[in-house]
Image (cartoon, rainbow, N blue to C red):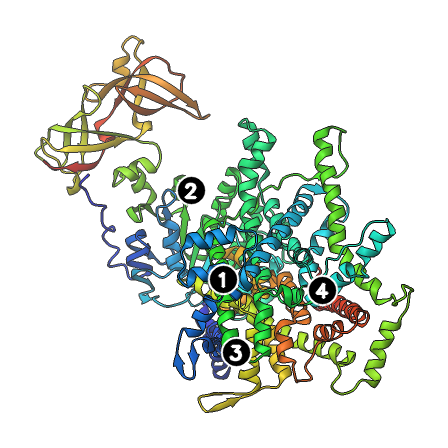
């Protein structure tokens, strides 16, 4: 066997001088590539997120050049924001405050109300999500896998479009009242009520709860349950002792995320609640519009502290409770058709049937109502008038009016740009947060912060920072509104790239990476050759996420698009909805179609179809 | 017990061809030291095995050599050169993991060729030839286009081996490469690994928890316990002259006796008389010239006798005492507690006082027995001076 023990060092020497230098250069670049990428990503985050956000937030504590907590004190002790709790902060006795809180005419204040509706929304989302998880994890039926993939859809649907869908469902002339009238029942007025907001939030977040819970339920090892059964536990006891403890952390994950998302809610409340049901974010928007930046910043910080508190508590919980049960044998799925007509077989299935009916209304009605409303005239007859309106507006609209084509074009351009920016950022952060080192949790939290910071504040910061121009070390950096929108979208989208890619990276067998390194591949080269190809479906899913987030993003866009021609489809819908529902629903359908088509394109570009 | 683990066999220091050297290497995770002040020298072309129970630090030691971990203190040297700060990709090592870690998104051929992206194949060989050559070497010449996941465990292990060897590494590191395989296959594969190793003459460091495997393939074995090697020696020495009580009990079956010396010879080698703990008997054990085992009257002592050196006979047989223990030998009385039939022999556990003894027997045994052994077959492990 000649040459098998050939010496690598000698082989390298065999190359020409030129090739040698090139090789060394390449090696040098490769060995520092990871550091360089980390630095570039950090710099991008500072420019696109931390610096602009900080410039706004700092206004809460710096007034006329002097540091003060006055603005904070005003906000914290104002019953308008904190309700009865504000009295506690301004020095009243806890007993008196507690009494007022228990009385029926208690005042919660804006912050209190925001938390209250977030808690209600979380409860509704968990209640609506758990039966779905049970169905998906424990039963086998045709289309189960498709349904499982579809649970991602509500979450990535543009929120303003969903709001339009809910208006079309719950409004005075909505489908719900039409149905009630048809059955001779009294009409209901749900629009601008807390119920409508909570149901809309559940529409968004219940599928999220269902997804994470299903995943946890599926990873429960059947032999653990079988062991419990063989030791004498009945099916219920085995569920309580073995299955529930493994599923429960996932439910908590879903609940924590739901709380954070609904605490910072904006478009849903703006469209379905109006200012009389204002949440913190809606009020921050209003303060920004009234140019009360200091108060807006102080309020946004309060919001941030609460959201980050929940996120951090959750991250710590997750770190303590994360268990990997890879390679486990999952619990066998049951057929939806009961094997025997006994009560024990029939009862859960009957429950599921009832659930499916409710879920069908919650999840399908808004979309169906929106589509229906877009082709229904004021007289109830089918018509294409609303679409005709869009075409006419495009042809004859004045420069200051919102026209459909620029909105579509901007949405697609921004989403493409945001995806191209968010994808590398997200992948780099995912790589960095799946390594083991001290302070990793901090990096993780810092990278995830955009999830918890008010989109209004990010938008405002970018507007005053990037758009109006920043001076850093003598260099003046200024960007157009369009660029700022792309940056804002990338910032809000990349955490989702991180969240889709990092579980895959973390789950990779460490010895795959180590084998490649022992074979001579640099750290960066291993990422390219081994890690990314193996988590490629997650990368494609992350791209789809970033794209969808961008296309549906409303909060920071509405701030940045003001005055600029940088309006997008969601902004256009919001402008239309203020006047008439018809054109808004037509625009909503256009948004739905464009989003759907984009997903198909992304999947094609991504190659192999392995689902989300 | 007082005795220190012995130093490296002398002669090592003057051997110029040291391929891998660990010099006082310690690896701490927080408060616990996974590897605790390890000094080892692995010679050029040697098949060197790190063996020990789980948690003894053998895999961490291998990972320190590969460069996946950096030592907390101490130095790893390759050919005399310090490897501090040298990443794994620049160490010219080949690694085979227990999980094989074949890249699932590449074919077998691409797997084997992967290392050739970073090192040229030997002069006059193309990449493809090199891959074919390696697949030939591991006896899987037609596997190049196959999907790694379509291969059996044993085949995957061989491909992992081919992949590690393709770039021509200086050192081959094997981390429990057989432990996921069944016993039969393991025996066949370890013979093949040994064959390839001697054919290529490549310095190989092998990690296993299986002492039998370690004895079977190695030129030298380091028996590790609690983050340090307790003995580094050729397999025969480790088996016949275990340096510590841990080594005596970890490598193969053994009977360890402790007791107090009641009579000692004047010369360094001779027979000791020991009042053993747990029995009334006074047993005699031969000491050799090893200064570590020189004992005098009153010392506490530990010595061991392998089961195959214990002769056992049923006490009921007439004149059995003679057959089990001829004049000048040690004799014990015990009763049979249990027996495991292993095919070739039977492994019998005896109750001797409140202790247990392991013996080998061909014929079935029952009831009271006598056990005898030659003082020559007793190996003194530890001596604690008064």
- The correct choice, above or below, for A583 with respect to B157 in the image is below
SS assignment at label 3: helix
Chain letter belonging to callout 1: A
SS assignment at label 4: helix
User: Label 4 belongs to which residue?
Assistant: A163
Within-10-Å neighbours for mark 1: few <14, some 14–19, many 20+: some
Label 4, label 2: how many angstroms apart (C-alpha)?
Answer: 68 Å
Label 1, label 3: how many angstroms apart (C-alpha)?
Answer: 20 Å
A348 or A337: nearer the eye?
A348
Precedes in sequence: disc 4 or disc 1: 4
Q: Residue A570: where, in percent of width, then height? A: 71, 72
Does mark 3 fall on the same chain as mark 1? yes
Label 3, label 2: how many angstroms apart (C-alpha)?
Answer: 74 Å
Does mark 1 fall on the same chain as mark 4? yes
Q: Is residue A24 visible?
A: yes
Chain letter belonging to callout 2: B
Precedes in sequence: disc 3 or disc 4: 4
Precedes in sequence: disc 1 or disc 3: 3
- The correct choice, above or below, for B282 with respect to A55 in the image is above
Residue A306: assigned label: 1
Q: Residue A446: where, in percent of width, then height? A: 47, 67
- The correct choice, above or below, for B130 with respect to A385 in the image is above
Q: Are marks 3 and 2 in contact (CB under 8 Å)?
A: no
B201 or A90: nearer the eye?
A90
Q: Residue at x 32, y 55 (%)?
A: B28
Q: Are marks 4 and 2 in contact (CB under 8 Å)?
A: no
Where, quadrant-wise, is the N terminus of chain B in this rendering? Answer: top left
User: Label 3 belongs to which residue?
Assistant: A293
SS assignment at label 1: helix
């Amino acid at each position: 066997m000649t040459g098998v023990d050939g010496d690598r060092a000698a082989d390298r020497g065999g190359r020409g001088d030129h090739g040698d230098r090139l090789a060394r250069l390449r090696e040098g670049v490769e060995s520092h590539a990871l550091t360089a990428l980390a630095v570039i990503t950090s710099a991008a985050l500072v420019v696109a997120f931390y610096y602009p956000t900080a410039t706004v937030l700092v206004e809460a504590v710096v007034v006329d050049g002097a540091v003060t907590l006055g603005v904070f004190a005003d906000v914290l002790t104002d019953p308008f924001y904190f309700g009865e709790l504000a009295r506690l902060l301004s020095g009243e006795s806890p007993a008196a405050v507690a009494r007022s809180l228990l009385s029926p005419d208690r005042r919660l204040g804006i912050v209190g109300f925001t938390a209250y509706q977030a808690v209600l929304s979380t409860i509704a989302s968990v209640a609506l999500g758990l039966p779905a998880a049970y169905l998906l994890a424990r039963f086998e039926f045709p289309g189960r896998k498709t349904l499982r993939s579809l649970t991602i859809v509500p979450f990535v649907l543009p929120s303003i479009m969903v709001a339009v869908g809910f208006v079309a469902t719950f409004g005075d002339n909505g489908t719900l009242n039409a149905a009630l009238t048809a059955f001779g029942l009294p009409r209901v007025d749900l629009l601008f009520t807390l119920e409508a907001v909570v149901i809309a939030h559940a529409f968004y977040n219940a599928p999220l709860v269902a997804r994470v819970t299903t995943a946890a339920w599926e990873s429960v090892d059947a032999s653990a349950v079988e062991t419990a059964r063989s030791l004498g536990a009945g099916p219920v006891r085995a569920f309580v002792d073995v299955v529930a403890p493994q599923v429960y952390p996932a439910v908590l994950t879903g609940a924590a995320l739901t709380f954070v998302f609904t605490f910072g809610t904006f478009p849903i409340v703006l469209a379905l609640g109006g200012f009389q049901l204002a949440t913190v974010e809606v009020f921050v928007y209003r303060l920004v519009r009234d140019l009360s930046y200091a108060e807006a910043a102080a309020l946004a910080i309060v919001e941030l502290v609460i959201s980050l508190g929940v996120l951090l508590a959750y991250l710590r919980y997750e770190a303590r409770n994360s268990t990997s049960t890879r390679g486990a044998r999952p619990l066998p799925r049951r057929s939806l058709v009961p094997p025997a007509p006994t009560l024990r077989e029939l009862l859960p299935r009957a429950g599921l049937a009832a659930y499916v009916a409710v879920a069908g209304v919650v999840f399908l009605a808004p979309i169906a109502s929106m589509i229906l409303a877009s082709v229904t005239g004021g007289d109830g007859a089918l018509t294409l008038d609303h679409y005709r309106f869009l075409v006419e507006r495009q042809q004859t609209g004045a420069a200051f009016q919102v026209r459909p084509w620029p909105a579509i074009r901007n949405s697609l351009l921004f989403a493409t740009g945001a995806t191209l920016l968010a994808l590398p950022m997200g992948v780099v952060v995912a790589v960095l947060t799946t390594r083991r080192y001290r302070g990793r949790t901090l990096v993780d939290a810092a990278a995830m912060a955009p999830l918890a910071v008010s989109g209004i504040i990010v938008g405002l910061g970018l507007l005053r920072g990037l758009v109006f121009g920043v001076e850093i070390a003598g260099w003046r950096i200024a960007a157009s509104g369009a660029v700022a929108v792309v940056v804002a979208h990338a910032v809000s989208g990349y955490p989702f790239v991180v969240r889709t890619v990092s579980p895959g990276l973390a789950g990779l067998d460490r010895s795959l990476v180590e084998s490649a390194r022992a074979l001579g591949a640099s750290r960066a080269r291993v990422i390219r050759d081994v890690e990314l190809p193996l988590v490629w479906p997650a990368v494609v899913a992350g791209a789809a996420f970033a794209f969808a987030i961008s296309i549906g993003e409303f909060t920071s866009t509405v701030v940045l698009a003001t005055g600029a021609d940088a309006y997008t489809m969601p902004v256009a819908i919001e402008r239309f909805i203020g006047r008439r529902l018809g054109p808004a629903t037509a625009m909503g359908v256009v948004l739905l179609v464009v989003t759907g088509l984009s997903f198909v394109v992304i999947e094609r570009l991504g190659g192999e179809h392995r689902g989300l | 017990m007082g005795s220190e683990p012995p130093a490296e066999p002398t002669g090592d220091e003057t051997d110029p061809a040291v391929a891998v050297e660990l010099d006082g290497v310690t690896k701490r995770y927080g408060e616990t030291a996974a590897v605790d002040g390890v000094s080892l020298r692995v010679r050029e072309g040697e098949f060197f095995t790190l063996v020990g129970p789980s948690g003894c630090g053998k895999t961490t030691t291998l990972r320190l050599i590969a460069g996946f971990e950096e030592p907390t203190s101490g130095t790893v040297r390759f050919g005399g050169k310090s490897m501090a700060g040298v990443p794994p990709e620049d160490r010219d090592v080949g690694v085979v993991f227990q999980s094989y870690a074949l890249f699932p998104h590449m074919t077998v051929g691409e797997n084997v060729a992967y290392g050739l992206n970073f090192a040229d194949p030997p002069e006059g060989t193309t990449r493809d030839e090199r891959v074919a050559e390696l697949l030939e070497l591991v006896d899987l010449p037609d596997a190049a286009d196959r999907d790694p996941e379509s291969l059996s465990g044993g085949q995957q292990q061989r491909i992992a081996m081919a992949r590690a060897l393709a770039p021509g590494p200086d050192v081959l590191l094997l981390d429990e490469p057989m432990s996921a395989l069944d016993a039969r296959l393991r025996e066949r594969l370890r013979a093949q690994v040994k064959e390839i190793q001697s054919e290529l003459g490549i310095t190989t460091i092998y990690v296993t928890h299986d002492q039998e495997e370690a004895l079977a393939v190695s030129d030298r074995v380091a028996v590790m316990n609690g983050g340090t090697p307790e003995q580094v020696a050729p397999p025969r020495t480790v088996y016949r002259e275990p340096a510590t009580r841990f080594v005596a009990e970890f490598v193969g079956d053994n009977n360890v006796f402790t007791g107090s010396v009641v009579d000692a010879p004047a010369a360094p080698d001779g027979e000791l008389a020991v009042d053993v703990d747990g029995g009334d008997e006074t047993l005699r054990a031969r000491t050799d010239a090893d200064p570590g085992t020189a004992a005098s009257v009153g010392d506490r002592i530990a010595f061991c006798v392998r089961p195959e050196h214990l002769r056992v006979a049923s006490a009921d047989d007439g004149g059995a005492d003679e057959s089990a223990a001829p004049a000048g030998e040690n004799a014990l009385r015990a009763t049979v507690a249990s027996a495991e039939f292993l095919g070739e022999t039977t492994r019998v556990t005896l109750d001797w006082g409140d202790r247990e003894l392991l013996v080998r027997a061909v014929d079935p045994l029952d009831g009271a027995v006598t056990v005898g052994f030659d003082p020559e077959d007793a190996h003194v492990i530890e001596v604690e001076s008064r």
